[in-house]
Image (cartoon, helix red, strand yellow):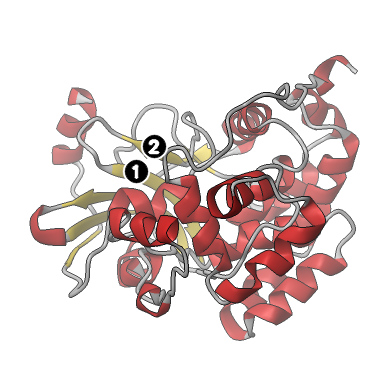
Amino acid sequence: MTSVVAELREQQPDAVTVWRPDYPVSLRLTVSTLGHGGYDPCHRWQRDGSLWRTSRLDSGPVSYRLEQLARGAIRAEAWGAGAAELIASVPTLLGADDDPDSFQPRAEVLRQAHRRAVGMRIPKTGRVLESLIPAVLEQKVIGLDAFAAWQRLVTRYGEPAPGPVPTDMKLAPTAAVWRRIPSWEWHRAGVEDKRASTAVRCAMHAVKFEHAAATEPREELYRRLMVLPGVGRWTAAEVGHRALGDADAVPIGDYHLGSVVGWALTGSVLPDEEVEEFLEPWRPHRYRVFRLLELTPGAAPPRRAPRMTRRDFRRI
């Protein structure tokens, strides 16, 4: 970390801002959902509590550092062609479009969770492919395996990030590069043909998705996403609560959704087919309910059944 700080002092950022919201914003609680594992090459927490991220914006690539200051202020520093665009988007990125005050907990466990998670807002990156590819990689596999695949692919096919980023950070591949990754490289990364084919199809439609996110209602982007074979409600919701700032993007079909929601709010695990109807009273904050319960110690039931089986697709 010392070397990064020293280099940071030498390479002045291309754009800087200090955002002082007039409501509580917790940097960690808000943006922690944007990362994909502890070794994500595009998302890296530092020991001083700051966060480094890389992204591809309309104006170009960018690396940026976010730091929570005293009294709720957040400092953002950015490097690269996309620096000015990133700095202008900081409030939106950190949940300025979110409306947690309209949330009605309806249950004591949620009231307590809402009070504990003061400053948690739903982020909005505006970048669809940035969330879509890792969501595809996370379909129906153990998180550790999906995170490892993401790390391998970004490290192998990503580009050097601008600025004094921490070691091993990269820009994720462009849509064109995702489309050209050979089938055997997906396999070597631990991704079987079905998810690899879905990721390639997503990359083929990336321009349309990004345009829809910027110009059309959320529902239209969800429709466009779910037309693609291999992209269902769960994958679309993963994009929704990261790229679109959608507090209602509940991940129907999530392996843990019925157990976390059911155990915390009813004392028993909910069958998958009953989860959606059960969460209906919390619309348009259904994802917020799930996220608050994820952050609540003891909300999930004690483990009795075996964990989901890990599969090493590189050996198949």
Determine the residue positioned at 85% across, 14% down.
Answer: 315
Contact between marks 1 and 2 (CB within 8 A): the answer is: yes
Q: Nearer the viewer, residue 259 or 156?
A: 259
Identified at 18% across, 75% down, the residue is 22
Image location of residue 259, percent across then percent down? 65, 44
User: Is residue 45 positioned above or below 273 on the image?
Assistant: above
Give the residue at x 58% y 39%: 158
Dividing the image into 4 quarters, which one contains the N terminus? top left
Q: Nearer the viewer, residue 123 or 78?
A: 123
Q: Nearer the viewer, residue 294 or 109?
A: 109
Q: Nearer the viewer, residue 70 or 39?
A: 70
Give the residue number, with chain letter if any, for mark 2.
44
Outermost residue on the top side: it is 315
Q: Which mark is residue 52?
A: 1
Q: Give above or below for 153 relative to 71.
A: above
Q: Could you tell me residue 295's position as x and y percent?
A: 43, 46
Distance from disc 1 to disc 2, alpha carbons, whole Å, reads 5 Å
Earlier-in-chain disc, 1 versus 2: 2
Left or right of 167? Residue 286 is right
Q: Secondary structure at mark 2?
A: strand
Residue 257 in picture, x, y percent from top left: 65, 49
